[in-house]
Amino acid sequence: MTAVLTGIAVGTGSATGPVARMAPMPPLPEPRTVADTAAEAEAALAALREVVADLESRARTAGGAAAEVLEAQGMMAADPVLAERVEKLVHEGRDGAHSLDAAFGEFRAALKAAGGYFAERTADLDDLRDRAVARLLGLPMPGLPAPGHPFVLVAEDLAPADTALLDPTQVLALVTGRGGPTSHTAILAKALGLPAVVGCGDTDDLTEGRLVLVDAAAGTVRLDPAPEAVASAAAREQQRRQRAGRVHGAGRTADGHPVKLLANLGALQELSSAASADCEGVGLFRTEFLYLDRAEAPGLDEQTAAYRQVFDAFAGRRVVVRTLDAGADKPLPFANADDEQNPALGVRGLRTAARNPELIDTQLAAVATAAAASSAEVWVMAPMVSVPREAADFAARVRAHGLTVAGAMVEVPAAALRAEAMADSCDFLSIGTNDLAQYTFAADRTLGSLAELLDPWQPALLDLVRMTAQAGERRGRPVGVCGEAAADPLLALVLVGLGVTSLSAAPSCLGEVRAALSEHTLEDCRTLADLARAAEDAQSARAAVLARTG
């Protein structure tokens, strides 16, 4: 019987191909006595500098969002505190390789303990350590394989520097031992349209060159698949691609019920592809890219120019701007305190306005100035709204700046429970399923061992979505979903059945979502939503809906 590994499904496609594994970390040699500590320290620091130069060079070649990822990783490797620690360890008697390993290990432990965004960056540090040690020892550089033919990439985890440079013409699918549905790898796989299974656990059986069939819809990796299984999967994949390309234009169900299909946008480098996509606008414009990796907040003119670029690219279409979501996974020195023991439950999102109102007022003034000079339909929403009073205060602030449409994100259970009161003062609500799952299940979204709890098919999460959507309907307010859940064509049917009026996802995912909606009536979607909510867990919810839709 063919062996099958299971994990967290990412995407809906499937692919068959030979395994190619990430190059492993170079092995550390036995510790040795250092005779010339100055020369040893310089060699270790030179290896670090070479890693930085390599990342900067790759960033210039990559361009776009990949360049941002590589530049950020290069900044970590260039941290003078890291260099000082490496040098100190060498002078204490360690050789260069073990000094690099120890210094990165200390930084890694500190980030892991901080949790949230910091914990997610541990993969970056592991990758930097491996590269620096390889440079120092003259060993092959770890990273993406290049077997000379298309392959299924298998890794324990993927560093951002590697995922940013994946070539979808060579990488057929992704399989990782760790990770969850909101991990960097999962999000990138969706953006590239690659089938992926993450959080697979033990991947030792996925040996180099072994043929595997990755089914992202089912969350399975089949080893040594039979020819008939490969042929059947290929036929389904062809049908899926044809189906996604058949329907165009505004989103709607088979009986004409409108569902706005919008794109997520997180950087200006993504603007061209997002604007050219078959979408009705932007449902989540993440503005953090203007604030990250800098000591001071961007000024009014810089923000206005950036927002104007986005609004002009989407002239005549909707653009939903999310105000600064600093804190937890995106800490900023000028916005957040450095003494929070649990940043995920601290001052983040809209809460930063109470500490530093100038940040949000400058941002709203910039959005208003850019919107006034554009024909885009500009909406503005606040992240991490917890109580109706916060929603009302934000809406008043937005309108005071001359902007006419103000909304609130529903990312904590309290907001869903009081969604009707929130809708009284807001013009719309937008559900961020990634954070809503994290806070509903008390499960850190960076912890792969809890990935099952973060599955957007969890019935309890769907209950909160329904509660919010019904509150919006009673108050005549649209309710969208802009989390990763909106990218799943099957789950999109459930969300519409729950009462959601718009879906925002990576542009590459919208074609399949549009096609799925066009094949089901609104009543079909409501039936599927009832099936999912009645299930015991996420896996059975998805299975029940898949069985009904065929």
Image (cartoon, rainbow, N blue to C red):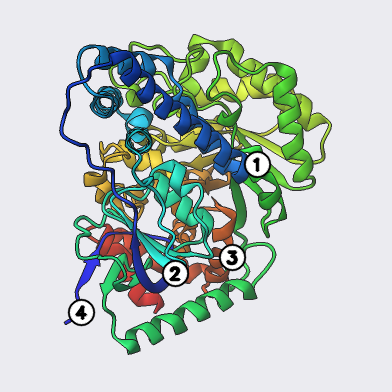
Residue 480: x percent and y percent? 53, 47
> 331 left or right of 225?
right
Quadrant (top left, top right, bottom left, bottom right) of the C terminus: bottom left
Question: Identity of the amino acid at label 3?
Answer: Gly
Spatial distance from mark 1 to mark 2, Cα to Cα? 26 Å
* Residue at the disc numbered 4: 2
**SS class, disc 4:** loop
| Viewer-proximal residue among 408 and 88 | 88
Question: Identity of the amino acid at label 2?
Answer: Gly
| Viewer-proximal residue among 102 and 134 | 134
Question: Identity of the amino acid at label 1?
Answer: Gln
Spatial distance from mark 3 to mark 4, Cα to Cα? 33 Å
Residue 141: x percent and y percent? 38, 45
Query: Is there CB contact under 8 Å for labels 1 and 2?
Result: no
| Viewer-proximal residue among 309 and 252 | 309
N-terminal label among 3 and 4: 4
Question: Identity of the amino acid at label 4?
Answer: Thr
Crowding near the residue tagged with mark 2, few <14, some 14–19, many ≥20 C-alpha atoms within 10 Å = many
**SS class, disc 2:** loop
Spatial distance from mark 4 to mark 2, Cα to Cα? 20 Å
